[in-house]
Image: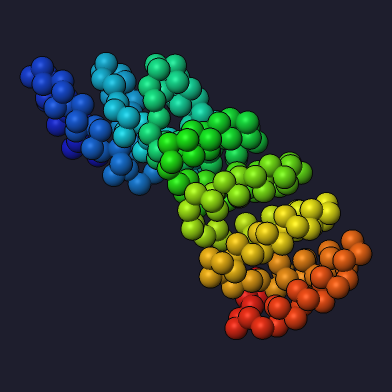
Protein backbone atom coordinates (compact mmCIF):
# COMPACT_ATOMS: atom_id res chain seq x y z
CA UNK A 1 0.00 0.00 0.00
CA UNK A 2 2.82 2.41 0.87
CA UNK A 3 4.40 1.63 -2.49
CA UNK A 4 1.18 2.71 -4.21
CA UNK A 5 1.12 5.94 -2.21
CA UNK A 6 4.76 6.58 -3.09
CA UNK A 7 4.08 5.93 -6.78
CA UNK A 8 1.07 8.24 -6.73
CA UNK A 9 3.12 11.00 -5.07
CA UNK A 10 5.83 10.64 -7.71
CA UNK A 11 3.23 10.92 -10.47
CA UNK A 12 1.73 14.01 -8.82
CA UNK A 13 5.16 15.63 -8.57
CA UNK A 14 5.47 15.12 -12.33
CA UNK A 15 1.97 16.63 -12.76
CA UNK A 16 0.57 13.33 -13.95
CA UNK A 17 -2.58 13.74 -11.84
CA UNK A 18 -4.78 11.44 -13.93
CA UNK A 19 -2.27 8.59 -13.64
CA UNK A 20 -1.93 9.15 -9.89
CA UNK A 21 -5.70 9.08 -9.53
CA UNK A 22 -5.89 5.77 -11.38
CA UNK A 23 -3.29 4.26 -9.03
CA UNK A 24 -5.48 5.05 -6.01
CA UNK A 25 -8.68 4.00 -7.76
CA UNK A 26 -7.12 0.61 -8.53
CA UNK A 27 -5.88 0.31 -4.95
CA UNK A 28 -9.23 0.70 -3.16
CA UNK A 29 -10.86 -2.53 -4.45
CA UNK A 30 -7.73 -4.44 -3.38
CA UNK A 31 -7.83 -3.19 0.23
CA UNK A 32 -8.56 -5.95 2.74
CA UNK A 33 -9.85 -3.72 5.54
CA UNK A 34 -11.84 -0.55 6.12
CA UNK A 35 -8.81 1.27 7.51
CA UNK A 36 -6.80 0.55 4.35
CA UNK A 37 -9.64 1.63 2.06
CA UNK A 38 -10.33 4.84 3.98
CA UNK A 39 -6.59 5.61 4.09
CA UNK A 40 -6.47 5.32 0.30
CA UNK A 41 -9.50 7.60 -0.04
CA UNK A 42 -8.04 10.13 2.42
CA UNK A 43 -4.78 10.09 0.46
CA UNK A 44 -6.67 10.98 -2.72
CA UNK A 45 -8.82 13.68 -1.10
CA UNK A 46 -5.87 15.30 0.68
CA UNK A 47 -4.13 15.74 -2.67
CA UNK A 48 -7.15 17.18 -4.42
CA UNK A 49 -7.99 14.01 -6.31
CA UNK A 50 -11.49 12.63 -6.59
CA UNK A 51 -12.66 9.03 -6.91
CA UNK A 52 -14.65 7.47 -9.71
CA UNK A 53 -18.03 5.80 -9.25
CA UNK A 54 -16.52 2.31 -9.02
CA UNK A 55 -14.10 3.40 -6.28
CA UNK A 56 -16.88 5.04 -4.26
CA UNK A 57 -18.94 1.88 -4.68
CA UNK A 58 -16.09 -0.36 -3.48
CA UNK A 59 -15.38 1.89 -0.50
CA UNK A 60 -19.03 2.10 0.56
CA UNK A 61 -19.48 -1.65 0.16
CA UNK A 62 -16.46 -2.32 2.40
CA UNK A 63 -17.84 0.07 5.01
CA UNK A 64 -21.19 -1.73 4.97
CA UNK A 65 -19.61 -5.20 5.15
CA UNK A 66 -17.50 -4.21 8.14
CA UNK A 67 -20.43 -2.60 9.95
CA UNK A 68 -19.46 1.05 9.45
CA UNK A 69 -22.94 1.88 8.17
CA UNK A 70 -23.09 5.45 9.52
CA UNK A 71 -19.86 6.27 7.71
CA UNK A 72 -21.14 4.54 4.56
CA UNK A 73 -24.32 6.62 4.58
CA UNK A 74 -22.39 9.86 5.20
CA UNK A 75 -20.01 9.11 2.32
CA UNK A 76 -22.91 8.24 0.01
CA UNK A 77 -24.86 11.40 0.86
CA UNK A 78 -21.85 13.73 0.66
CA UNK A 79 -19.88 12.31 -2.24
CA UNK A 80 -22.65 10.80 -4.37
CA UNK A 81 -26.01 12.44 -3.71
CA UNK A 82 -24.47 15.79 -2.76
CA UNK A 83 -22.53 15.92 -6.01
CA UNK A 84 -25.40 14.74 -8.16
CA UNK A 85 -23.71 11.47 -9.09
CA UNK A 86 -26.03 8.62 -10.04
CA UNK A 87 -25.33 5.33 -8.22
CA UNK A 88 -24.86 2.18 -10.27
CA UNK A 89 -26.54 -1.15 -9.53
CA UNK A 90 -23.79 -2.31 -7.16
CA UNK A 91 -23.92 0.86 -5.11
CA UNK A 92 -27.73 0.74 -4.92
CA UNK A 93 -27.50 -2.82 -3.60
CA UNK A 94 -24.94 -1.77 -1.00
CA UNK A 95 -27.15 1.11 0.11
CA UNK A 96 -30.19 -1.16 0.47
CA UNK A 97 -28.21 -3.24 2.96
CA UNK A 98 -26.78 -0.11 4.61
CA UNK A 99 -30.16 1.56 5.10
CA UNK A 100 -31.72 -1.67 6.38
CA UNK A 101 -28.99 -1.96 9.02
CA UNK A 102 -29.74 1.64 9.99
CA UNK A 103 -33.47 0.89 10.17
CA UNK A 104 -34.17 3.43 7.40
CA UNK A 105 -36.55 1.32 5.36
CA UNK A 106 -38.04 4.14 3.30
CA UNK A 107 -34.59 4.98 1.97
CA UNK A 108 -33.85 1.28 1.43
CA UNK A 109 -37.13 0.89 -0.46
CA UNK A 110 -36.27 3.87 -2.65
CA UNK A 111 -33.01 2.18 -3.71
CA UNK A 112 -34.84 -1.13 -4.16
CA UNK A 113 -37.49 0.47 -6.37
CA UNK A 114 -34.80 2.12 -8.50
CA UNK A 115 -33.28 -1.29 -9.20
CA UNK A 116 -36.66 -2.77 -10.11
CA UNK A 117 -37.41 0.14 -12.47
CA UNK A 118 -34.03 -0.42 -14.11
CA UNK A 119 -35.01 -4.10 -14.52
CA UNK A 120 -32.00 -5.04 -12.41
CA UNK A 121 -32.35 -8.00 -10.06
CA UNK A 122 -31.24 -7.07 -6.52
CA UNK A 123 -28.55 -9.14 -4.81
CA UNK A 124 -29.76 -11.98 -2.60
CA UNK A 125 -28.22 -10.12 0.35
CA UNK A 126 -30.19 -6.98 -0.52
CA UNK A 127 -33.44 -8.93 -0.84
CA UNK A 128 -32.88 -10.68 2.47
CA UNK A 129 -31.99 -7.40 4.18
CA UNK A 130 -35.11 -5.51 3.09
CA UNK A 131 -37.47 -8.42 3.82
CA UNK A 132 -35.90 -8.90 7.25
CA UNK A 133 -36.05 -5.16 7.90
CA UNK A 134 -39.79 -4.98 7.25
CA UNK A 135 -40.47 -8.13 9.29
CA UNK A 136 -38.48 -6.80 12.26
CA UNK A 137 -40.55 -3.60 12.16
CA UNK A 138 -43.77 -5.66 11.99
CA UNK A 139 -44.48 -4.53 8.43
CA UNK A 140 -44.94 -8.01 7.01
CA UNK A 141 -47.20 -7.06 4.10
CA UNK A 142 -44.55 -4.65 2.84
CA UNK A 143 -42.00 -7.46 3.19
CA UNK A 144 -44.35 -9.70 1.24
CA UNK A 145 -44.74 -7.01 -1.43
CA UNK A 146 -40.97 -6.88 -1.93
CA UNK A 147 -40.85 -10.67 -2.05
CA UNK A 148 -43.52 -10.72 -4.79
CA UNK A 149 -41.69 -8.10 -6.85
CA UNK A 150 -38.48 -10.11 -6.64
CA UNK A 151 -40.22 -13.41 -7.46
CA UNK A 152 -41.99 -11.92 -10.48
CA UNK A 153 -38.78 -10.36 -11.78
CA UNK A 154 -36.54 -13.43 -11.50
CA UNK A 155 -36.01 -16.93 -10.15
CA UNK A 156 -33.64 -15.63 -7.50
CA UNK A 157 -33.59 -17.97 -4.49
CA UNK A 158 -33.57 -16.52 -0.99
CA UNK A 159 -31.92 -18.21 1.97
CA UNK A 160 -33.89 -20.42 4.36
CA UNK A 161 -33.97 -17.74 7.07
CA UNK A 162 -35.75 -15.36 4.71
CA UNK A 163 -38.51 -17.85 3.84
CA UNK A 164 -38.87 -18.87 7.50
CA UNK A 165 -39.13 -15.28 8.69
CA UNK A 166 -41.62 -14.25 6.03
CA UNK A 167 -43.94 -17.25 6.44
CA UNK A 168 -43.81 -16.87 10.23
CA UNK A 169 -44.64 -13.17 10.14
CA UNK A 170 -47.51 -13.58 7.68
CA UNK A 171 -49.08 -16.59 9.38
CA UNK A 172 -48.88 -15.12 12.88
CA UNK A 173 -50.94 -12.15 11.68
CA UNK A 174 -53.50 -14.22 9.84
CA UNK A 175 -52.24 -13.65 6.30
CA UNK A 176 -52.39 -17.35 5.54
CA UNK A 177 -52.90 -17.13 1.78
CA UNK A 178 -49.86 -14.86 1.48
CA UNK A 179 -47.83 -17.23 3.66
CA UNK A 180 -48.90 -20.18 1.54
CA UNK A 181 -47.91 -18.25 -1.61
CA UNK A 182 -44.37 -17.87 -0.23
CA UNK A 183 -44.38 -21.64 0.39
CA UNK A 184 -45.52 -22.26 -3.21
CA UNK A 185 -42.73 -20.06 -4.55
CA UNK A 186 -40.22 -22.09 -2.53
CA UNK A 187 -41.46 -25.30 -4.13
CA UNK A 188 -41.56 -23.82 -7.65
CA UNK A 189 -37.96 -22.64 -7.28
CA UNK A 190 -36.84 -26.11 -6.23
CA UNK A 191 -36.10 -25.07 -2.65
CA UNK A 192 -36.88 -27.94 -0.24
CA UNK A 193 -39.37 -26.74 2.39
CA UNK A 194 -37.99 -26.37 5.87
CA UNK A 195 -39.51 -28.08 8.90
CA UNK A 196 -40.00 -24.62 10.38
CA UNK A 197 -42.05 -23.36 7.41
CA UNK A 198 -44.18 -26.52 7.30
CA UNK A 199 -44.96 -26.39 11.02
CA UNK A 200 -45.71 -22.68 10.88
CA UNK A 201 -48.21 -23.12 8.05
CA UNK A 202 -49.99 -26.17 9.46
CA UNK A 203 -50.28 -24.74 12.99
CA UNK A 204 -51.51 -21.40 11.66
CA UNK A 205 -54.15 -22.97 9.41
CA UNK A 206 -55.45 -24.91 12.42
CA UNK A 207 -55.30 -21.84 14.68
CA UNK A 208 -57.34 -19.76 12.24
CA UNK A 209 -60.00 -22.46 11.78
CA UNK A 210 -58.89 -23.78 8.40
CA UNK A 211 -58.35 -27.36 9.59
CA UNK A 212 -59.20 -29.10 6.31
CA UNK A 213 -56.59 -27.03 4.48
CA UNK A 214 -54.09 -27.88 7.21
CA UNK A 215 -54.77 -31.59 6.65
CA UNK A 216 -54.40 -31.24 2.87
CA UNK A 217 -51.15 -29.32 3.33
CA UNK A 218 -49.84 -31.94 5.76
CA UNK A 219 -50.54 -34.70 3.22
CA UNK A 220 -48.92 -32.65 0.44
CA UNK A 221 -45.79 -32.06 2.51
CA UNK A 222 -45.44 -35.79 3.17
CA UNK A 223 -45.22 -36.35 -0.59
CA UNK A 224 -42.08 -34.22 -0.96
CA UNK A 225 -38.79 -36.03 -1.39
CA UNK A 226 -37.07 -34.01 1.30
CA UNK A 227 -37.80 -31.51 4.02
CA UNK A 228 -34.89 -29.53 5.42
CA UNK A 229 -34.50 -29.36 9.19
CA UNK A 230 -33.72 -25.64 9.35
Residue 87: name its quadrant.
top left
Residue at 14% of width from left, 27% of height from top? 19
Residue at 64% of width from left, 64% of height from top? 184
Determine whether, in the image, residue 43 is placed left or right of residue 214.
left
> Residue 77, image x and y in percent?
48, 22
Residue at 71% of width from left, 67% of height from top? 197
Determine whether, in the image, residue 47 is placed left or right of residue 199.
left
Colour scheme of the rendered structure: rainbow
> Residue 64, image x and y in percent?
49, 40
Is residue 164 visible in the rendered image? The answer is no
Determine whether, in the image, residue 26 is placed left or right of residue 114.
left
> Residue 198, image x and y in percent?
73, 71
Residue 226: name its quadrant.
bottom right
Figure check: 184 above or below 67: below
Camera-side residue of 6 and 204: 204
Determine whether, in the image, residue 4 is placed left or right of residue 205.
left
Residue at 34% of width from left, 25% of height from top? 42
Figure check: 147 above or below 6: below
Camera-side residue of 114 and 39: 114
Viewport quadrant of the C terminus: bottom right
Camera-side residue of 47 and 125: 125
Viewport quadrant of the N terminus: top left
Total tally of numbered discs in the picture:
0
Figure check: 110 above or below 214: above
Is residue 8 visible in the rendered image? The answer is yes
> Residue 125, image x and y in percent?
51, 50
Amino acid sequence: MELSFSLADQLISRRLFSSAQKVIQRLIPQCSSVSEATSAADFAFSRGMGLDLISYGCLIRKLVIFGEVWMAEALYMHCMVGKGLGPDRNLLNSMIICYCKLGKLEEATSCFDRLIKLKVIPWVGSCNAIIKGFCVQDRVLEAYGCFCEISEASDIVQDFACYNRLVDGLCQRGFLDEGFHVFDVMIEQGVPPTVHVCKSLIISFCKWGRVEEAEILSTEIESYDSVVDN
